[in-house]
Amino acid sequence: MKSAMRLRKAGPGKKAFILLVQCGLTAYALLILYPLFHMVMSSLKSPRDIMLDAFSLPQRVSWDNYALVWSGKGFGGYFLNSLLITGGSMLLVVLLGSMAAFGLARYKFRGNTLLSLLFLSGLMLPLKAAVIPLFQIVKGMGLMDNPLSLLLVFTAMGLPSTVFILCGFMKTIPSSLEQAARMDGCNDLRIYRQIILPMSAPSIALVTIYNAVPIWNDFFFPLVFIQSDRLKTLPVGLSSFIGQHATQWDLLFTGLSIAILPMLALYLAMSRYFIQGMTAGAVK
């Protein structure tokens, strides 16, 4: 409503510019949404319908592909594995990252800058570049074909960006709030848990979305460290539908349609939480 009122009050040149921007954003949204729509529609088709006309709507809507993929192809197990690994990794990333950021942002000590640069260097060096020594470390620890190896790797992969983002945000929190809490008898743990974390909700939502999506979609590390079929994650499980001589397109589209749901739900939930965190007051 407010945007409509602003549009009515704007001059002719500004109206034209606003309409042009809105048309561009609408076209961009359609460009993003159409492949997703095509993927879902293809998941409701038979292989014959996909081969005859890949871009047509399904002649008969059938949910048989979803039942086959979920139960018959073991997709439910892959989904659960990805859910547990992503959830566990994000729990460790947010917990450890927020604690490290709290220490770096709120305390001054010898080596503070050096430690910050150490975390920052993790953003400059991709973890996949060190896959050979990483493989040797995981093998030496006896964690090959163990989900714990993925938890540790993904936690290490997400910590640098988490510490960098949260540390910058926590430095902007007024120190007067912390001083008032200390006067009321709060210790460091209580300040961190009841003041710093709630006020850092927007940045926590940001790092959650920023790290959860790559972890959920990661194909490389599960392929390297996991060999058992029952421990495979969704991206590795989806590759089973792609054969050397033929690809099961209907099942592949079905698996992809299922795989996007958790990240879509996470994004919607975190977006709302991000807005709530931005509008939350810090009045004592």
Image (cartoon, helix red, strand yellow):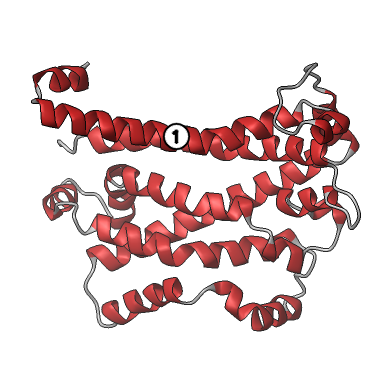
- Give the residue type that dot 1 points to: Ala
Q: How far across and how far down the image is residue 192, in percent?
A: 31, 52
Q: Residue at x 71, y 26 (%)?
A: 56
Q: Residue at x 88, y 54 (%)?
A: 243
Residue at image mark 1: 29
Residue 129 percent location from the top left of the image: 59, 78
Residue at image location 49% in from the left, 62% down from the top:
158
Q: Residue 135: image x %, image y %?
A: 71, 78
Between 230 and 199, the one nearer to me in the picture: 230
Work out whether residue 42 or residue 174 is closer to the camera in this orientation and state it: 42
Few, some or many residues within 10 Å of mark 1 (<14, 14–19, 20+): few
Count of numbered circles on the image: 1
Q: Is residue 274 above or below residue 238?
A: above
Relative to residue 154, is residue 68 drawn left or right? right
**Residue in view at x 8 percent, y 25 percent:** 11
Judging depth in this view, the residue of 178 and 83 nearest the camera is 83
Q: Helix, strand or loop at disc 1?
A: helix
77 displayed left or right of 269 = right
Image height of 128 relative to 102, above or below: below
**Is 121 left or right of 130, judged from the image as shown?**
left
In the rendered image, residue 50, in percent from the top left (x then y), is placed at: 80, 33
**Quarter location, residue 271:** top left
Residue 68, by quadrant, is top right
Q: Which quarter of the image is occupied by the N terminus? A: top left
Residue 119, quarter of picture: bottom left
Q: Is residue 105 visible?
A: yes
Is residue 280 visible in this depiction of the protein?
no
The vertical placement of 41 against 266, above or below, is above
Is 106 drawn above or below residue 36 in the view shown? below
Q: Which of 105 and 233 lies nearest the eye of the viewer?
A: 233
